[in-house]
Amino acid sequence: MIRRLRAFLSDGLEPVGERTARRENPRDTRRWIRERLKPLVVIVGVSLLLRTFVLRSVVITSGSMDDTLLAGDVLLVNRAAIGTRIPLVGLRIPGYSEPRRFEVLVFRPPDGRGLTLVKRLVGMPDDTLMMRERVVFINGQKVEEPYVRHRGTRDKAHLSMSWQAQYLAPGMERSTYHPTRDNWGPIVIPKDQYFVLGDNREESLDSRYWGLVDVTRIEGRAAFIYFSYDHDSYRRFPYLRTIRWVRMGTAFD
């Protein structure tokens, strides 16, 4: 295949006599075109298959996962680990593992905005989950989160958090439930649903606001950062002039 690609790229070195003969015979011309296009078609096809079912890349554009992921990090995503959808068919190919608590996931949010988000998986199916004064509790146990970044902003309520009322733990009264960013729950996570949070906890729009993530909406597991640059730099061509070499190769999987 590589040999054919080289021949295609070096067409300008082809003897004049051969090009003249090919012009005089349309069948030879079509055969020549097919031979040159075959390796390109194979390369494109393999690339599409890899991106659809095995690996893909995601560029981080917000600070919701600071300092774990920074704006400008280019993340390689393992799509085969948890499974992936077949485009236009709606079927899903099973992965070789299940989602793991506290891992970084790439997924499509449930509100249908067509976005791809990156957050940390905190709540698993059947978990009883709550937050008190910014501290997460899972099944009554306090969770230590060394990766979390906190800011000194005041707690606040948000109307979009009202979805939580339908998942309240037994004994909780819906009519008096008023969740806030830093104080909510306890809620019970149903089957095949997951609760995700951003590491930059006070600057992240996550499951607290727009709801649970169905397993079918998970796109993959964060593998490692293979490129990084200062996304907020004002310098021209920041992806060339502000490369963050120290972040390249940071692994998550």
Image (tube, rainbow, N blue to C red):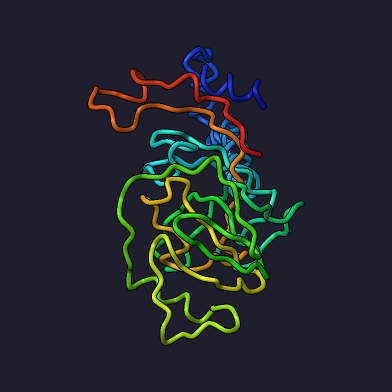
Residue at the image point whose x is 59% and y is 24% from the top = 5
Quarter of the figure with the C terminus: top right
> For this rendering, which residue is in front, 224 or 176?
176
Q: Position of residue 194 (x, y in %)?
A: 59, 64
Name the quadrant containing residue 223.
top right
Quarter of the figure with the N terminus: top right
Whether residue 98 sits left or right of residue 150 in the image: it is: right
Whether residue 94 sits left or right of residue 214 in the image: it is: right
Name the quadrant containing residue 243.
top left
Q: Position of residue 148 (x, y in %)?
A: 49, 44
How many numbered discs? 0
Residue at the image point whose x is 54% and y is 32% from the top = 225
Up the image or down, 201 lies above or below 240; here it is: below
Up the image or down, 248 lies above or below 216; here it is: above
Residue 89 in view of the camera: no
Q: Position of residue 21 (x, y in %)?
A: 53, 23
Residue at the image point whose x is 57% and y is 34% from the top = 40
Q: Position of residue 75 (x, y in %)?
A: 52, 37
> For this rendering, which residue is in front, 77 or 2?
77
Up the image or down, 97 lies above or below 63; here it is: below
Residue 149 in view of the camera: yes
Up the image or down, 128 lies above or below 182; here it is: below
> For this rendering, which residue is in front, 92 or 144?
144
> For this rendering, which residue is in front, 47 or 119?
119
